[in-house]
Amino acid sequence: MKAEWDDLKTVLAVARGGTLAAAAKRLGLNYTTVARRIQRAEAALGVSLFHRLPDGYRATDVGQLVAERAATMDQQADGLFRALRGRDQTLRGRLVLTAPQLLIGPHVAPVLEQFSTLHPDVEVLLRATNDLLDLNRREADLAIRISRTPGDTLLGLRLCEQQAASFATPSVAERLKDSPNAPVDWIVYEQSPNVPKAALEHFPNNRVRMVFDDMAAMVGAAQAGLGVVRMPMFLGRASVGLQQIPVLPPQPYADIWVVAHRDVWPSAKVKAFRDLLVPWFKASECCFVA
Amino acid sequence: MKAEWDDLKTVLAVARGGTLAAAAKRLGLNYTTVARRIQRAEAALGVSLFHRLPDGYRATDVGQLVAERAATMDQQADGLFRALRGRDQTLRGRLVLTAPQLLIGPHVAPVLEQFSTLHPDVEVLLRATNDLLDLNRREADLAIRISRTPGDTLLGLRLCEQQAASFATPSVAERLKDSPNAPVDWIVYEQSPNVPKAALEHFPNNRVRMVFDDMAAMVGAAQAGLGVVRMPMFLGRASVGLQQIPVLPPQPYADIWVVAHRDVWPSAKVKAFRDLLVPWFKASECCFVA
DNA sequence: TATCTCACATGCAAAAATGCATGCATGAAA
DNA sequence: TTTCATGCATGCATTTTTGCATGTGAGATA
C-alpha cells in the first residue's frame, strides 16, 4: 500500500525487457531487486502481472494493462525531464552527445576539444554509435546524424551537404586504369546491397564481391585491397591507403544534421555546443563534397 | 539518479498540500521522509523546487512545472487503479463506500448487514460524510449521494425520489394550531438560509430564528423545541419527538443516487452492493415521499 | 550423457530509507 | 511578556530495501 509509482515503473521495464535482467539493466538495479518489486506490486494489487516462463517474464493481461498505463506515465516523466533540461541555463554538469563512429575522429573531436576548453565544467559523454538513440527518452541530449530527415518531434540544423564516391587502394586503381573492361569488385553495404547504378554507365562490368554490415569494416577491406567501396567523401579522404577512383562519379549522399528534441534545444549546454559545431562544419564543408 | 517517480509524487503532494506535514499525511508517511525526498529530488534535478517559508513550502517556478507534470502522471495512475478495480471480479477484499451520515442509520445500515452476511470476505469501509469524496481519486468505490446530478465522469442510478417537509415537536405543532397567526420560528440550513417560499402561502408570519451549518444539529434543535425545520421526509419521520407540521407542504427535494466512476462500476463488489441497494430503496420508497 | 548458458529463486550482510525524539524559529493568543 | 501552536531541521535507532553469493531447473551444444 506504499511506494507504488516506482513499482509501476518497474513493471513497465520488465514488460518491455522480457526478463528481469534486461529490466534491471535498464533501471540500473540488480535483477533481484526488480524481482522483489514485481512481487510487491502483485501483492499490492492482488493480481498476477507476469507469467514466469523458463525464458523470462511475460506480462499477463493485467500486466499488459498496467504496463500500458505506466508507459504513458513514462512519457510524461520523459517530457518533464526534457523540459527541465531545456530550461537549464547553466554550463555545468553532463552533456550527452551521440554521433556516428566514423564521423567523430576526423570531424567531431576537434569541436569536442574546443568545447571542453571553453566550458571545462561541462562533462561531455559521447555515445559513438550508428544506432538512432531515442532523444525522446533522453538517451542523448544532442545527436549528429547522417540522415535525410531530422525527425518528427525533433529540431535540427543541416551542418553540411555530403557526396559519396568510390574508393580503393592505389593498386586496384592502377589495375582499373590498365584494363577498363576487367570486372570491378565491389564491397557493398548491407543496407543497399547492389552496385551503384551510376557506376554502370562507364564501367558496365561490375560485380558484388562481398556484402558487409559495418562501414568501418568496409574501409578496412578496401584498405586491404579487396575491392571498391562506395563511401562518403570525407571518409574515403580520411582513410590512409585509399584514393578516389573514377568508377563512380561523386553523387549526392545523405546530409549531416545536428538534431535535438525541441524541448531540449534551448538548453544552454546544447546551444553552446551547437554554436561551435555549426561554424566548424561550415568551414570544413570542402571535406564533404568533391 | 535512481528512484525518481516516487519523488515526483512527493513533490506533487507537497505542492498541493503546502506543508510537509500535509503532504506526509496524504502520502501516509512521516513528514521527515517527505522533506528528505524533496531534498533528494532537488539534488537529482539540480534545481530548487520549493521556497522554504516560515509557514510551509511554496513551489518555485520549476517546482510548479514538476508538480504539473506529476499531476498528469497522477491522473494516469488513478485511471490505472480504477481500471484494475473495475476488472476485479472477486468478492474478497475491501470495498469503500461513502454516504451522508443521516441516511446511513435508517436506510443504509440494513443493506450493509445483508451485504456482509452474503459476502463475508468483503471488508466494507464506510466513510460517513457529506463531503463529496473524489471518486476519480479513488477516495471511495461507491457513493450514495443526495444530489440533483450524478456527476460528469460518473455513472449513477437514481435510488428514489425524495420530498421535504416541515417538522417540529408536538408542542410547537400545538401552539401553531392554536394561534395560526403567531410567528413561526425557523431553524434554517446555511446553504439555503431563508424561510422556504412555499411556507409563506398559508403562514405569512415567519422568521428565521437560527441558521445552522449541520443538519444533524438542526434535528437536535428541532427536538429541543427551538423551532421548525425543513428536512427530508425520511429524516423527520425517523427522528423521535418530531412530527410533520402543515406549515410547509411536501415539496420536491434532491433525489437519492448511487454513483461510481465508470471505470469502477463493473467491479464485482460494486455490482453486488448495487444489486442489494437498488431493490431495497425501491421497496422503501414510501419513506421518502408523502 | 555431460556441459554450458541463461533466467530465476533464496539466504545473508551491507546499505539506504524511514520514523521518532529533540530542538529551533516564527507568529498568534493569553 | 509569556505561552502555545505550527512548521521545519537534525541526530540516532530501527526497519526496509538492496546487492551479492550461491543453488536450481530448462534448454542448447558437444
Image (tube, coloured by chain):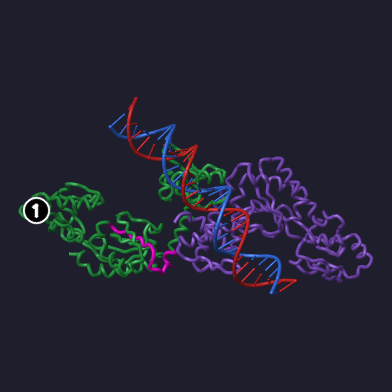
Chain colours: A purple, B green, C blue, D red
Quadrant where the N terminus of chain A sits is bottom left
Who is closer to the viewer here, A29 or B189? A29
Placement of the C terminus of chain A among the 4 image quadrants: bottom right
Residue B249 vs B41, above or below: the answer is below
Magenta-drawn segment: B83-100
Q: Position of residue A114 (x, y in %)?
A: 73, 43
Judged left or right of residue B119, residue C22 is: right
- Look at the image and say whether residue A127 sits in the magenta stretch: no
Residue corresponding to mark 1: B171
In the image, what residue type sits under mark 1? Ser
Relative to residue B131, is residue B227 drawn left or right?
left
Identify which residue, B225 or A61, lies in the foreground: A61
Q: How many dots with numbers?
A: 1
Q: Residues within 10 Å of mark 1 (few under 14, many from 20)?
A: few
| Residue A86, percent from left and from top | 59, 48
Confirm whether residue B121 shows in the render. yes
Chain letter behind tag 1? B
Q: Secondary structure at mark 1?
A: helix
User: Image point 20% across, 51% down: which residue?
Assistant: B218
| Residue A71 seen by the camera | no
Q: Residue furthest right?
A: A178
- The residue under the point 91% across, 65% down is A176
Would residue A150 be found to the left or right of residue B77 on screen? right
Q: Is residue B150 left or right of residue C19?
A: left
Q: Position of residue B140 (x, y in %)?
A: 36, 59
